[in-house]
Amino acid sequence: MRRWLVLSMALASAAWADDVQPKGASGAQARQLQFKVKKIVSLEAHTEKPSFYGDPRPHLLDRGRALYYGRGAFYGPGLVYVVELPKLEEHLLEAPTAEFSQQHPELLVKPVVEDMPCLDRTDGRAALVLKDLKEQKTYVAWWDLAQNALTSAFVVGEKGKANWVGVSAIGYLPERGECFVHVEKSVGAGFDDAVVAVGKDGARTVATFHPKFITSHGPWFDPVHQRAAIVEIVEVPGAQPTGYLVDLANGGVRPFPIPQLVYGFTFDPDGRTLYAYGVKAGELWAIDAATGAAARRIRMGDVGHALGWIDDALTVVGNVRIHLLDKRTLGHRGAVGTRRIAPEAVNVENSIVLPDGTVALDTFYKLYMTRVEQ
């Protein structure tokens, strides 16, 4: 934990030292944008009984109508903390994991929620990531919201003696009735990765690939085009990381080059372009989804974490600024200082741009729900 904190502080310091002043298409300094903080959501409000972990990173649920923000710890291991969108109402959901654990002693399931990768109130179900007591098997369990009961659990990853397994949320496709997760497994000096779909009756492997480097950041979900993007993370000088575009419908995997340390990624709504921000080089790439080629590259300098859309503007949430860009030219439309919004902000790694254009600016303990005006 301390190592990651030191790394985060180092990245933040590097961003301020290496910041490139944003310029508009004419070469003039980009205009300063106005903003409004709509609400501050804080895990600190729940630091006593129950307390919360602010991990995994925030991700969208319920067809973009809710945001996962944290999970219970200690006194509330079955709790999930979500923010309803666009109302920004906070809710604590208590999953009946203890009852399920008692009903299925043969599974040795811990009553601790590790993540909620999927929630769909229309279909009346949610999916939870659980582990067994020995930390060997990782399950995705279905939660029937109407009955308030966990109805089944399926193994999606199993740890061996000399490896580890990580499971990350991708999202839910209602037309398929499946929750998709990314499973990463260390194997010797490399990795075996898979995208797994969990349905009502079991889990199936959609796609497999074998990255050279760890894929710990992401994945990113494109429900409209039924795709996910998964990226390698590496800091070795001269190394060329790879991104993987996974077709959730047919299992196809398209590798494509990416800049080093991609912390921010997004899909163009038209489906033709992928955008990736590489922290190591401070570069934003516009990548052709069909060919995998980087059609445009610009250097920004700021440590960019979240990418998304405010109206038709490509938005980069950085440690120093929130940048609004023209998606065709990647020229600046405007920017606003991150610390103007959140004075204590140093590293905003887990920030996210919501579907309505609200920026959820994460400062580790608080989410500043902010609307930036073009």
Image (cartoon, rainbow, N blue to C red):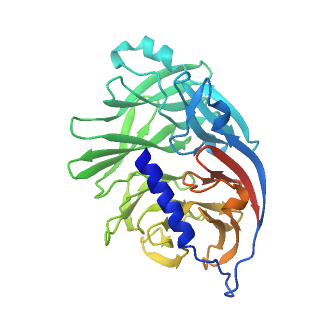
Q: From this view, report whether residue 292 is shown above or below residue 86.
A: below
Residue at left 60%, top 40%? 69
Picture quadrant of residue 313: bottom right
Picture quadrant of residue 335: bottom right
Residue at left 53%, top 78%? 298
Residue 273 in sight in this render: no
Picture quadrant of residue 81: top right
Horizontal side of 36 relative to 128 (left or right) equals right
Residue 92: x, y in percent?
65, 29
Residue at left 50%, top 67%? 14
Residue 207: x, y in percent?
35, 49
Residue 70: x, y in percent?
57, 37
Which quarter of the rendering shows the N terminus?
top left
Residue 329 in sight in this render: yes
Horizontal side of 191 relative to 2 (left or right) equals left
Which quarter of the rendering shows the C terminus?
bottom right
Q: Nearer the viewer, residue 344 or 259?
A: 344
Residue 211: x, y in percent?
30, 56
Horizontal side of 308 relative to 254 (left or right) equals right
Q: Residue furthest bottom?
A: 26
